[in-house]
Amino acid sequence: MLNKRVKEGIKQFHSENRKIKFCLGTLALIGLCVLLLIISTFTQIKINFNLPESGIGSYLKFEYIPQIPIVIFIAGLLGETWGFIAVLIYILMGLTPWFPVFALGGGLSYIFQFNFGYIFAYLFAVILCSREINKGNSIKHIIFAVLYGILTVHVLGTLYMIIIALIRHESFDFIANWIYYQSLSKILYDFVFGILALIMAKGCRKILWLIMG
């Protein structure tokens, strides 16, 4: 009987598209998500497809930083409002001189770093990803939510990088290499890990709804 009531509650949760209410638990979740973003910034997943016989093994080795999947996880877990706040807190922390939570440090001058556009784009990625996943729970909505999040970060991040590069009078080769190594070579991994992250987030939301009411 209890199991049936739980299943009915979860079904109602999805049908009403309920949001996580503000409470102390919500603040704790926001803090946890900020911590996850910080940890992911300094976490490197080594991806190595070294194929000596191909003669191009060295080009198939790089270290992957799972920040974008974590942003997608936050969007799926907290939703648009609280997810946006969690990412905003992370960015504001990094722009102060006291919390060097970005990959290359922190401080207000970080806005002139080539990669700051990617970080700033997390805010828009959370919004678009959350809005898409709120439309439904089908695999189509999951895929589109992840795509919106990934493309938002990479497109805005690349445009921002190009602007900074032009201001600094960087060469075309520099810009092309940056786009390849920071975006094109990692989009597929962002998509795969992003799908997994969003599925995990949706599972966590079910548990949190039962705990937090």
Image: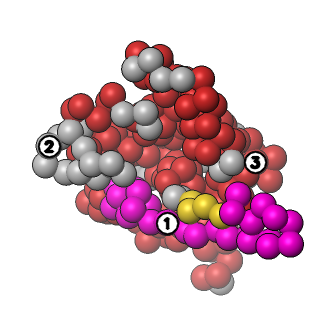
Crowding near the residue tagged with mark 3, few <14, some 14–19, many ≥20 C-alpha atoms within 10 Å: some
Numbered disc 1: secondary structure:
loop
- Which sits in the foreground, 148 or 202? 148
Residue, far right? 53
Q: Quadrant of residue 116?
A: top left
Q: Nearest the camera: 162 or 32? A: 162
For the question of whether residue 190 can be seen, the reply is yes
Q: Position of residue 31 (x, y in %)?
A: 30, 58
In what element is the residue under mark 3?
A: helix
Residue at figure coordinates x 69%, y 63% from the top left: 58
Disc 2 is placed on an element classified as loop
Q: Give neighbour class at mark 1: few <14, some 14-19, many 20+ (Cα, 10 Å).
A: some
Are dots 3 and 1 in contact, CB under 8 Å?
A: no
Residue 44 got which mark?
A: 1
Q: CA distance from mark 1 to mark 2?
A: 24 Å
- Residue at label 2? 97
Which stretch did the figure color magenta? 33-59
Taking the spot 44% from the left edge, 66% from the top edge, the residue there is 43
Which circle, 2 or 3, is nearer the viewer? Answer: 2
Amino acid identity at mark 3: Ile
Residue under numbered circle 3:
143
Q: Where does residue 128 sit, x and y in percent of width and height?
A: 59, 34
Report the mark closest to the observer, 3 or 1.
Answer: 1
